[in-house]
Image (cartoon, rainbow, N blue to C red):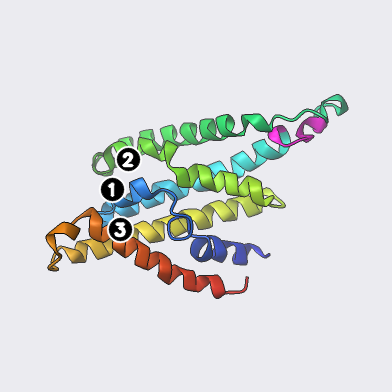
Amino acid sequence: MSLFHLFLKSVFVDNMIFAYFLGMCSYLAVSKTVKTSAGLGLAVTFVLVVTVPVNYLINKYLLAPGALAWISPRLATLDLSFLTYILFIAIIAAIVQILEMVIETFTPSLYSALGIFLPLIAVNCAILGCSLFMQERGFANVGEAAVFGLGSGLGWLLAIVAIAAIREKLRYSKIPKGLQGIGISFIITGLMGIAFMAFMGIKL
């Protein structure tokens, strides 16, 4: 599979929200305005672009069975894969902490708008899920891992901006009281997920 096909597949076919419903907490909580949603979506994309390649290298040269053979042939039988979750989450948390400090310094208004959901990117299941998918699919090189991270991030950005735009328009609609707020958001997310299933027919 070419890098372009991998990119398209990660954005549309394997969309983290509409295909796997990962990262739903931030997706539903922050998607009240397009501006805030776009800010969080870009932050998630940045974290994925950085963490997925880094975790790929850690997995290839440290965690995978036989990965330590480059240090010494005696370590070829050592398997550190049980450390996968700890190291992956540590890398994600470090990158999120750096991102949080940058946003607070240069765009304090966005930092205030995102609130608690900015540091919670570290426990966003879409972020960890992307690294675990990378490990499971066994990409050939770090370039494929980076493209997969970029595509997954942009797919998540597309999803949250789309739902935010719809929710802004819904303010002017007459919605039954029992469905107002999170209720109608769940329904729209489900319909959008069904719509994105159409992309599964694309041969990549």
Tell me: residue 136, above or below residue 75: below
Residue visible at 48% across and 44% down?
127
Indicate which disc residue 117 carries: 2
- Amino acid under disc 3: Phe
Camera-nearest residue between 13 and 72? 13
Camera-nearest residue between 99 and 105? 99
Element type where label 3 sits in the image? helix
Query: Which residue does the numbered mark 1 point to in the structure image?
Result: 29
Residue 169 belongs to the span the image colors magenta: no
| Mark 2–mark 1 CB contact (< 8 Å) | yes
Tell which circle, 1 or 3, labels the residue nearer the N-terminal end.
Answer: 1
Camera-nearest residue between 190 and 27? 190
Q: The N terminus lies in which quarter of the figure?
A: bottom right
Residue visible at 48% across and 69% down?
197
Indicate which disc residue 186 carries: 3
Mark 2 to mark 3: distance in Å? 19 Å
Tell me: residue 42, above or below residue 74: below
Say left or right for 81 vs 185.
right
Say left or right for 4 vs 79.
left
Mark 1 to mark 3: distance in Å? 11 Å
Indicate which disc residue 102 carries: none
Magenta span: 62-70
Magenta: main secondary structure? helix
Element type where label 2 sits in the image? helix
What is the x, y in percent for residue 153? 47, 53
- Amino acid under disc 2: Phe
Crowding near pointer 2: few (<14 within 10 Å), some, many (20+)? some
- Mark 2 against mark 1, which lies toward the viewer? 1
What is the x, y in percent for residue 100? 37, 36
Residue visible at 57% across and 44% down?
131
What is the x, y in percent for residue 195? 41, 71
Tell which circle, 2 or 1, labels the residue nearer the N-terminal end.
Answer: 1
